[in-house]
Image: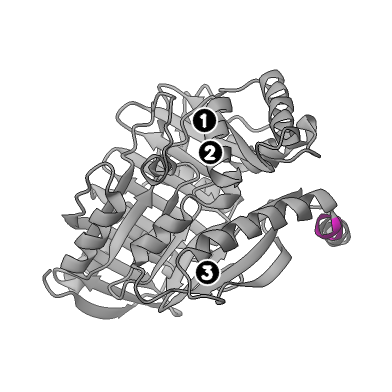
């Protein structure tokens, strides 16, 4: 790869520069903007950075995505930006996805970006470019910002009716009673055909309503990811692996006093704690496949954290990577995130395909970046709007964990709570 040229620039108005940078990036075939929105999160969220343009695509062959990704990284040793779709489960285990795929996102996409813009600290921006950083800075600061309505002419509808959802919850509970599974993450889709949106305007609206520590706005050719994720799938720093499963959700209160009461109820809720503990055990087992013996550790259990729209119960699991395990193997061993499958993992994924009405695709997969040192950070693609600009198909999904103690009406309402910000920005808020 050519050498990256690095320059630091001072900007007077960081909000203006950020807006100009996003408008500039949208003219490239591929870009990804990551941010933690300044949210305090255990072990931090995404750094604020923008990747734009393609220097090289990572070629992959179906059935060997992880091996191809490792080989491409070894040959290039540069930043890699991209995603892994949930349906890669089919090359990790003997599974299949029976539903049609109207979104049409490729199973994975990674690329070496031509330009990287790192924001901060303060009023500084750092441009790492394969061309001239000063020219990139000039292009960005010369970009005109155009206002646009987020959506127009969208007719959003649920793929699964409330009645279907309730019936399926009862079927899942029967599987639990029969001992087939302990827990299953059951999701439903909201979709619109012939949808016209301005992806950047939708992202800004969603990020304004639901700022999250693993926010992503990404474009790969005709496909857009508009993501407000609170959840980390997996992070690698040196030999350290970190995963932070979320299980447990509660609404925000009307004031600080009600907020504290709701957080206390969530923390002590036996059902939510049981769900969280099951997934923590699953994540521990996933990390143990890549870890040095005895290094897997639960750093925090049942942590309750507050976001703009809701409270979440988050646990943190860490491990030390064995020297002979490649970073892509560590990702493969833990993929997809256990909080979005259930336990046992393989049986849960089989039942997900049987009972859900939609192919998940990128939803509940992972988006993130890999550094030139082979470190990485990936979120879980949830609370995300997916859009195919060529076919004008728009989709987002929401789900909840079904255990034997689950009650269908409560789980359905939890799905709507998680979907509320996305419903609002697409003009279908309750």
Q: Tell me the SS state at disc 3.
A: strand
Cα distance between the residues tagged 3 and 2: 23 Å
Looking at the rendered structure, which numbered label has been put on residue 353?
1
Q: Tell me the SS state at disc 2.
A: helix
Identity of the residue drawn at 40% across and 35% down: 387
Q: Earlier in the sequence, mark 3 or mark 2?
A: 3
Residue 201: x, y in percent? 44, 44
- What residue is disc 2 on? 349
Cα distance between the residues tagged 2 and 1: 6 Å
Q: Earlier in the sequence, mark 1 or mark 3?
A: 3
Identity of the residue drawn at 22% across and 44% down: 61
Tell me the chief SS of the magenta region. helix
Q: Is residue 266 magenta?
A: yes
Q: Is residue 109 magenta?
A: no
Along the viewing direction, whichever of 147 and 410 lies nearer the viewer: 410
- Whether pointer 2 and pointer 1 mark residues with C-beta atoms closer than 8 Å, the reply is yes
Q: Is residue 65 left or right of residue 242?
A: left
Which stretch is magenta? 264-268
Residue 336: x, y in percent? 48, 49
Query: Badge 3: few (under 14), some or many (20 or more) residues near its Cα, within 10 Å?
Result: many
Residue 85: x, y in percent? 40, 44
Whether 246 is drawn above or below 99: the answer is below
- Whether pointer 3 and pointer 2 mark residues with C-beta atoms closer than 8 Å, the reply is no
- What residue is disc 3 on? 242
In the rendered image, is residue 397 in sight?
yes
């Amino acid at each position: 790869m050519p050498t990256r040229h690095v320059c630091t620039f001072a900007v007077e108005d960081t909000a203006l520069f950020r807006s100009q940078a996003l408008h500039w990036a949208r003219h490239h075939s591929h870009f990804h903007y990551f941010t933690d929105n300044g949210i305090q999160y255990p072990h931090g969220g995404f750094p604020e950075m923008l990747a734009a343009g393609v220097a090289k695509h990572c070629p992959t062959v179906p059935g060997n995505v992880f091996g191809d990704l490792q080989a491409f990284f070894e040959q290039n040793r540069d930043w890699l930006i991209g995603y892994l779709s949930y349906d890669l489960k089919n090359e990790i285990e003997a599974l299949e996805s029976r539903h049609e795929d109207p979104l049409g996102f490729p199973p994975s996409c990674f690329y070496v970006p031509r330009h990287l813009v790192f924001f901060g600290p303060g009023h500084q921006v750092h441009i790492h470019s394969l061309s001239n950083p000063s020219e990139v800075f000039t292009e960005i600061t010369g970009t005109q910002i155009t206002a646009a309505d987020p959506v127009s002419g969208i007719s959003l509808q649920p793929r699964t009716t409330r009645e279907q959802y309730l019936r399926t919850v009862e079927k899942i509970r029967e599987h639990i009673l029969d001992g087939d599974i302990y827990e299953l993450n059951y999701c439903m889709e909201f979709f619109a055909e012939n949808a016209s949106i301005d992806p950047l305007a939708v992202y800004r609206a969603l990020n304004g309503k639901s700022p999250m520590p693993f926010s992503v706005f990404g474009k790969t050719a005709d496909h857009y990811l508009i993501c407000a994720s609170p959840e980390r799938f997996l992070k690698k720093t040196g030999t350290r692996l970190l995963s932070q499963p979320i299980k447990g959700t509660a609404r925000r209160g009307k004031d600080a006093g009600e907020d504290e009461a709701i957080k206390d109820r969530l923390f002590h809720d036996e059902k939510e704690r049981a769900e969280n503990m099951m997934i923590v055990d699953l994540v521990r087992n996933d990390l143990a496949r890549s870890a040095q013996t005895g290094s897997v550790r639960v750093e925090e259990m049942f942590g309750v954290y507050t976001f703009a729209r809701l409270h979440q119960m988050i646990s943190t699991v860490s491990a030390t990577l064995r020297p002979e395990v490649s970073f892509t193997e560590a990702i493969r061993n833990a993929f997809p995130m256990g909080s979005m499958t259930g336990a046992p993992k393989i049986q849960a994924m089989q039942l997900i395909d049987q009972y859900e009405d939609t192919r998940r695709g990128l939803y509940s997969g992972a988006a993130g970046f890999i550094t030139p040192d082979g470190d990485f950070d990936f979120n879980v693609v949830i609370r995300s709007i997916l859009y195919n600009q060529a076919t004008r198909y728009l989709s987002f999904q929401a789900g909840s964990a079904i255990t034997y103690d689950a009650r269908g009406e409560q789980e359905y309402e939890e799905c709507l709570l998680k979907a509320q910000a996305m419903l609002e920005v697409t003009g279908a808020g309750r």
